[in-house]
Amino acid sequence: MNAHAPFSFALPGSDRIIVIGAGIAGLATALRLAPRPVTLVTAAPLGFGTATGWAQGGIAAAMGSDDAPALHAADTVAAGAGLTEADVALRVAEAGPGLIDWLVGLAAPFDRDAAGALALGLEAAHSRRRIVRAGGDSTGRMVLETLVRVVARTPSITILVASARDLMRDARGAVAGVVCERDGARFPLPGRAVVLATGGVGALYASTTNPRGATGRGLALAARAGAVLRDMEFVQFHPTAIATGADPMPLATEALRGEGARLIDETGAPVMAGIAGGDLAPRDVVARGIFQAQARGAQVFLDCRGDLGARMATRFPTVAGLCAAAGIDPRLQAIPVRPAAHYHMGGVKVDATGASTVPGLFACGEVASTGLHGANRLASNSLLEAMAFAPAIAEAAAAVPAPGQGRAEATTLRSDGDPEALRAVMERQVGVVRAAEGLAEAVRHLAPAARAGCDAALTGLAIAASALSRRESRGAHWRSDHPTQDVPAHTELILADLWAMAEAVEPGRAVAAA
Ligand SMILES: Cc1cc2nc3c(=O)[nH]c(=O)nc-3n(C[C@H](O)[C@H](O)[C@H](O)COP(=O)(O)OP(=O)(O)OC[C@H]3O[C@@H](n4cnc5c(N)ncnc54)[C@H](O)[C@@H]3O)c2cc1C
């Protein structure tokens, strides 16, 4: 169903600040705003429906005696394939140790060594041991539980379980609140500033490790409000999602390969043989290696049999539990795996205070494009990024003047489209390996639903159109028809650009595809 119903409410609105999303980004921002009044809008009850709760690896921070923020920043820049902004990487890395101390102060139960010091893990592309973790591979759940506990006893934070469906703007175009939906009814929630903390886009793909709600609605809301979206084409595919038919797909953390697990095909032959870096190559290289083997008809498995399989229950309890639920005994059986959409590097373009290009609108966490991740995220940098930006966002949002007299408007477009058809198109045409023809087909498929008001289609369209416009291969974006790198540059678009890009490839329009 489509409904194009204008929504209007009288200002002055409330002095409150609205945070949309209750993962690490939303919770950390709400806490940093205390004691200022905050309404935290979340589509699912606190503690549910977040990628945060599923994080397995941990949080990167230069805590070791042989480490320094400059080294962490250098690794981040190297992973970003020419598009990470060095000053942002350094600022976030410098904030790391203090943010771990902040979580420790909130009673986060991080793993410690025999001497009581934080146990630091090593992950691919990190030059030092700097991954802080909790409960082995249960870091996300434990950090989320810690933050939820503190938020629940913070009186300035009001929780509203509802879905944000649109942003309201005043006569100057500044964001002045949110149109929410609960039990099929829509209602306005005025506020002086809105912080999007709505997470990623993985659920736009048929194969994903993300929660079902990760459809990038926050990006669609921002685009409809006039915000600039940046580097939307950069979607990171995790190489080893467990392929046993579950949706979303459970994750087999990369740390398993760090500890000796090998990628094999159904004959036992190594899948990554002959590829630089082998099983420990960067995430995008391994994802492409597996994708290409599967495109040739091979089945791919993560082989943890033997000693690693025996240690799994203690060292990787989350993966052990996921395998048990899927009926796999990793001591005896190799785990079937496939690449899956995992993390979105692109997002709402923000500055150092998390401010978007629209007054009153901020973005934090995976929905934001801060300049940290470039074309490829360094593992375990995303939880850190969200916490690192929250204090500056809180300060800047608190300084936004309350809306003046007048009325605020929003046009709430409603259409859910056909989610499964959308996910199939994204998987087939906007996945691990891309080419102009398939991307143009995706744009043609998604544009009508996006125009009809389907937020998921709008976000998918922005990813596909940006991928079509980037005629090179860089980081997580691989074009089989443009396999080399060009000069590093960001892609940016606003809604009008997106419609123009769609028209350029739609039937009967000027043929201007790549
Ligand atoms: C399986 C897995 C493992 C990972 N492991 C790691 C790791 O080890 N280290 C690391 O740094 N990163 C890891 N990541 C990435 C990291 O977990 C995420 O990038 C991070 O948690 C994102 O936090 P967030 O707060 O931005 O979004 P989320 O935690 O996803 O929270 C989004 C919130 O927004 C809400 N929401 C969305 N849309 C709306 C709407 N329209 N209205 C109201 N509410 C809405 C959701 O309900 C949810 O509360 C992993 C991700 C996955 C999926």
Image (cartoon, rainbow, N blue to C red):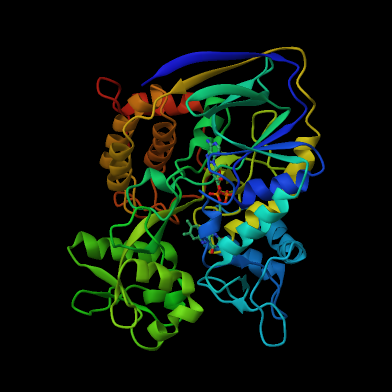
The residue closer to the viewer here, 195 or 135, is 135
Residue 221 position within the rendered picture, expressed as x and y whole percent measured from the top left: 53, 30
Quarter holding residue 62: bottom right
Q: In this view, does 417 lie to the left or right of 476?
A: left
Residue 175 position within the rendered picture, expressed as x and y whole percent measured from the top left: 66, 25
| The C terminus - image quarter | top left
* Vertical arrangement, residue 188 with respect to residue 154, above or below: above
The residue closer to the viewer here, 447 or 176, is 176
| The N terminus - image quarter | top left
- Residue 119 can be seen in this image: yes
Quarter holding residue 13: top right
Query: Which residue is at 49% across, 32% downward?
Result: 220
Residue 177 position within the rendered picture, expressed as x and y whole percent measured from the top left: 65, 26
Query: Which residue is at 72% across, 62% downward?
Result: 103
Q: Is residue 506 left or right of residue 184?
A: left
The residue closer to the viewer here, 410 or 331, is 331
